[in-house]
Image (spheres, rainbow, N blue to C red):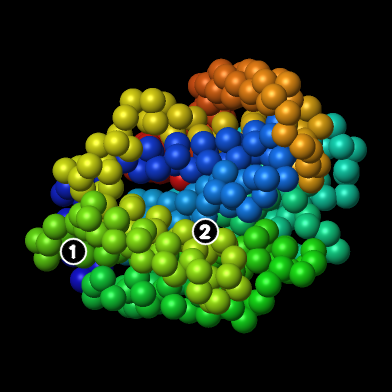
Amino acid sequence: MISAAIGEQRALGKHINALTGVRAVAVLLVFLGHLQQRFFPYAGLDGSILSAAPYYGMTTFFVLSGFVIHWNYSELFAKERPAAAWWKFFVARFARLWPLHFAVSVLAIMQSRDFGRFAQHVFMVQTWVYEGSFNISYYNTWSISTEWFFYFGYAVSFPLIARWLRSGSIWLLPAIVTPAFAAYWFAGPVTGAPDLWLRYIAPYLRLFEFSTGVVAAQIVMTRRVHGKNDLSDVTLALVIALTVMFYHTALCQRTNVNYLVAPIVAVALMVSSDRRSLLSSALSATSLLWIGDRSYSIYLLEAVYLVALGYDFETHRTFTWSDFVVGMTCASFGFALVLILSHFCWRYFEMPARMVVKQALSGRLNSLRPSRTTLS
């Protein structure tokens, strides 16, 4: 069944504009949330949707990553010999992540003089082990390490994934959501640095978010094989409504925001895969596609900008109009500046460096040329 789904996927084409739009939404949630924490640290905003926006954005990134990886690479692992598939996959993903990650890590060490973790960042393993602190130095690069772990998990477990996903029916979504919430329940609430590392930074629990995206991609592929329509906008609205109701339960309050948004994102990805849906049309707006293409540069450079300003989201102050006006001015300037710098970074460093690394590691990767849907 999984091979049939792959064949249907290839016939329909891999590129889905809306996925690039989802990536834009995710990076905007992170960026705007960080701007709020930096320029509008009002106590009244604590616990609001705006203050939680970066957390929602990260969950969106991780679920989207699982969807995109399975959507683009399931055929590679199903058709190629394991050694060849592994090599092509890791060369492509390493070339995607490492150049900009390394460049930003160098900038960070020059600013912080924190040399102790530089080797971990070079190999993108800094979040894999807890070392007595959050280990999220070097700006936003922590999530790149977590993402890198996901790739190893996917490549190693693909034979098992292929068997488990064989049916590809809609029941797979609650099948992954249920153990995910159970895992967060047993992990318990955040009471200190080790809990924060395990619940938010480390890849082990967040692997459920990535896996939810993998399941969503397989559901779409299999439904198309059977001639079934993708999920509708109405389905997404119902899932959102159920999630809002679920938010007030004891389970949700104990699991916090780490996984709550993942099922919504998974359904949104399935809906947006249908070009006829309203959600797909909205996410395919030109402005979102522009931001989505440059999202990796935006994600890392926005942290560089905020750290350079002395980023500190723990400081809270009483609301005043004068502070608000200054904050709006600085936030607007920073938002525009980061978008401009990210465009030049994407065009003149990120994309060329990616191709250079690919060519240096292997000359046999022509079948994996970058497209929007491979920029997870």
**Secondary element type, mark 1:** helix
**Secondary element type, mark 2:** helix
Corner quadrant of residue 188: bottom right
Most foreground residue, 238 or 106: 238
Most foreground residue, 293 or 90: 293
Q: Left or right: 74 with respect to 302?
A: left
Q: Which labelled disc corresponds to residue 211?
A: none
Vertical arrangement, residue 50 with respect to residue 179, above or below: above
Which of the marked residues, 2 or 1, is nearer the chain's N terminus?
A: 2
Q: Quadrant of the N terminus?
A: bottom left
Vertical arrangement, residue 60 with respect to residue 17, above or below: below
Q: Residue visible at 35% across and 61% down?
A: 241
Can the viewer see residue 179? yes
Q: Estimate the x, y position of residue 45 in percent, counting from the top left.
A: 65, 45
Corner quadrant of residue 319: top right
Can the viewer see residue 166? no
> What residue would you read off at disc 2?
151
* Mark 2 neighbour density, 10 Å: few (under 14) some (14–19) many (20 or more): some
> What residue would you read off at disc 1?
223
Q: Left or right: 221 with respect to 134?
A: left
Q: Estimate the x, y position of residue 305 in percent, counting from the top left.
A: 71, 28
Most foreground residue, 160 or 307: 307
Corner quadrant of residue 102: top right
Callout 1 amino acid: Arg
Q: Residue visible at 29% across and 56% down?
A: 236
- For the image, the number of numbered tags is 2
Q: Residue furthest left?
A: 227
